[in-house]
Amino acid sequence: MNSLNYEVLRNTEKLYYKDQYLAGANTQVTRVHSDGIELQSTVAYPEGGGQEADFGTIELPIGTVRFVWVKKLYGSPIRLEGFKGGKLGGIIIHSLHPDDLHLLDEVTVGMPARVTIDIDRRERLTLSHSASHFLYAAAISLREELKQWTIGCHIKEDSARFDFLVEDAFTAEDVLEIERRANELIACDAPIEHYAVQGLEDARLWTYNGIEIPCGGTHLESPRRIGRVSVRRKRLGKGKERLICVFPDAEIDVSTYHEPAL
């Protein structure tokens, strides 16, 4: 087996899909990279689907290092309708803070490790990602063609946005109507369901009141804590528009996060 095939076949166990509220876990080092550490399993969510990566720490026998980004590499394509660009499996690398990179020389494969995430950041990203789906659902309910012309999204702690190709720019009335529809959906406060499709861990579906969106990110169990969203538009150039939502009344609750049972 050549080295490329080995890289493709190696997988990191994604503990965040088994328990989204797991704040830390014991694991071990499986590979040391030039800018970070690969672990056998992790609670840290990597950048994906527009959602920014978790931050956190890895405790090692040689000391504690900070990771400031998490990325997923390799994997095989998800061959299901609606999951374009998604990957099954893959490895996850925790990219270290520049000031901690020198410690990589002391890290060895098989070394025991404890990975812990910044739960406040995770919960803010989780809330933001759920809010973004209400923005998206409202936008495509107004203009169904946007579903086929979505060209990007970005989920940050304090805002979320979607970029679209459009024939006609959003008017002020459009933006107000999208905001109204998004808040109407949120006010229903129905359960948010998020689950794997056909037993494929990385092929996940977000559903709410009959709305279905393929998504592998982290999400709330209900929209109650999002509060009202405010929507604005930004022109990106001819035929390109951005919709941005913020949620100034959001309530951040990290009480459901926990350490693994002994």
Image (tube, rainbow, N blue to C red):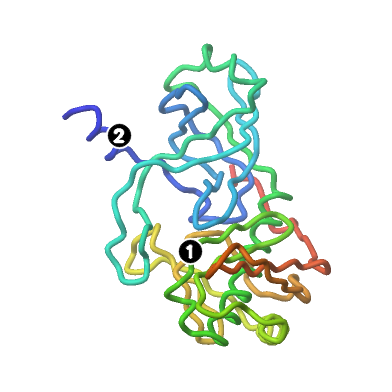
On the rendered structure, is 113 left or right of 97? left
From this view, report whether residue 19 is shown above or below residue 100: below
Q: Residue at horizontal 38%, vertical 62%?
A: 203
Mark 1 secondary-structure assignment: strand
Q: Which residue is at the far right?
A: 249
Q: Nearer the viewer, residue 106 or 176?
A: 176
On the rendered structure, is 97 left or right of 163? right
Which numbered disc, 2 or 1, marks the residue that appears first in the sequence? 2
The C terminus: image quadrant = top right
Where is residue 35 shown, x and y percent of the image? 52, 25
Indicate which label's residue lies in the foreground, 2 or 1: 1
Name the amino acid type tagged 1: Ile
Where is residue 81 shown, x and y percent of the image? 31, 71
In the rendering, which numbered label is found on residue 169?
A: none
Q: Residue at horizontal 47%, vertical 33%?
A: 39
From this view, report whether residue 96 is shown above or below residue 122: above
Q: Quadrant of residue 192?
A: bottom right
Q: Which residue is at the far left?
A: 1
Where is residue 11 shown, x and y percent of the image? 35, 41
The local crowd at label 1, few if under 14, some if 14 to 19, many if 20 or more residues have their Cα within 10 Å, is some
Q: Are marks 2 and 1 in contact (CB under 8 Å)?
A: no
Q: CA distance from mark 2 to mark 1?
A: 29 Å
> Which residue position is annotated with label 2?
7
Q: Residue at horizontal 40%, vertical 41%?
A: 73
Q: Nearer the viewer, residue 154 or 184?
A: 154
Name the amino acid type tagged 2: Glu
On the rendered structure, is 56 left or right of 166? right
> Which residue position is annotated with label 1?
151
On the rendered structure, is 110 left or right of 142? left
Mark 2 secondary-structure assignment: helix
